[in-house]
Amino acid sequence: MSVPAAFRAFRIHHDKAGYRAGLETIGLDDLSPGELVIRAAYSSVNYKDALAGTGEGKILRRFPLVGGIDVAGHVVASSDARFREGDAVLCTGCGLSETRDGGYSEYVRLESQWAIPLPAGLDLREAMILGTAGFTAGLALFRMMQNGQTPTMGPVVVTGATGGVGMLAIDILTRAGYEAHAITGKFEQLDFLTMLGARQVVSRRDLDLGQRPLETAIWAGAIDNVGGEMLAGLTRVIKPYGNIASCGLAGGHTLSTTVMPFIIRGVSLLGIASAGTARDIRERVWQRLASDWKPAHLPAICTREVGLDELHEVFPRMLQGESFGRTLVRI
């Protein structure tokens, strides 16, 4: 399959004319180098994409770049013998829309070391409903299990539960045999979170995690998308030898706590850096996401599907906290 001389891409610039982003017509030579060229089918919208697309966050390391930290599609050209024309692949993070051109393009060039063959059990659309958000949630559980977290220890709570990572984490935890609880500022979505598998939903407005170095232990572990005061509070209420997977900073990047939970209860704080995960772990997590951890409610979690020409409308809403679930980008 040949690549057309010109195709559409959502490109981001920052130069003397200012910060700007939008649809452009580009060619293959405009893209970052790589061993694979794929015809993109789907991407997704993550908080990081919204920051990059609006300039509200310093995400891109160079300009101009095509946006989009996720992509899935079919190989149309390969100089790596491991991949052939027609192979279905996905890529999340790994420098996309940061140091190299990303997934918001009809054709994408990838480094083969980061392209993951689409695992059996997922189609391209499902892979991008998961995207970085699903991979992050899956990686959080993977790290927690590596560090001894088991379902018999008790419930695992998910903060920021109505975001993409939060929803998928609840579904994945439930599929993996854990009892999932949810903390959310959108308590009107109680029924939705319960449908995903949350056995208990706590309103953020009613939440009291105390102020003492150690409070009454409530949960056996946590997947935290909020950071700041929420993360500090969680350290005080996790049961002995439980794990907190830190995935996000929607509530702030600072952390003020004590060493007491760590040296008295043996609580572990695990950093989840999904963008730079080693390939072998990346493949293992995706295999789980395509099989026994595959969320049971992917169609419901995908609450919006847009084209490349609608991205400029989606980003501001996400940054204003108006997004709900996952937004799929149809390319």
Image (cartoon, grey):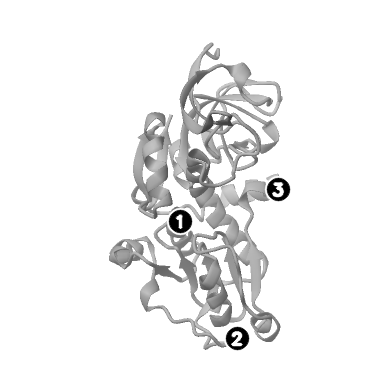
Horizontal and vertical percent for residue 173?
A: 49, 63
Could you tell me which residue is drawn at 53 percent across and 72 percent down?
229
Which amino acid does the dot numbered 1 rest on?
Leu
Q: Nearer the viewer, residue 29 or 83?
A: 29
Q: Crowdedness of circle 2 by 10 Å Cα count: few (<14), some, many (20+)?
A: some
- Judge whether 37 appears above or below 293 on screen: above
Q: Is residue 240 left or right of residue 105?
A: right
Q: Nearer the viewer, residue 310 or 123?
A: 310
The residue pinned by badge 1 equals: 168
The residue pinned by badge 3 equals: 278
Which amino acid does the dot numbered 3 rest on?
Ala
Secondary-structure class at tag 2? loop
Q: Quadrant of the C terminus?
A: top left
Q: Is residue 203 visible?
A: no
Q: Evaluate if marks 3 and 1 touch, with contact meaning CB atoms under 8 Å apart.
A: no
Horizontal and vertical percent for residue 136?
A: 56, 54
Going from N to C along the chain, the mark reached first, 3 or 2, is: 2
Horizontal and vertical percent for residue 270?
A: 65, 66
The residue pinned by badge 2 equals: 213
Q: Crowdedness of circle 1 by 10 Å Cα count: few (<14), some, many (20+)?
A: many
Q: Is residue 79 visible?
A: yes
When asked about the image quadrant of residue 91, the answer is top right
Q: Residue furthest front?
A: 16
Could you tell me which residue is drawn at 48 percent across and 41 percent down?
54
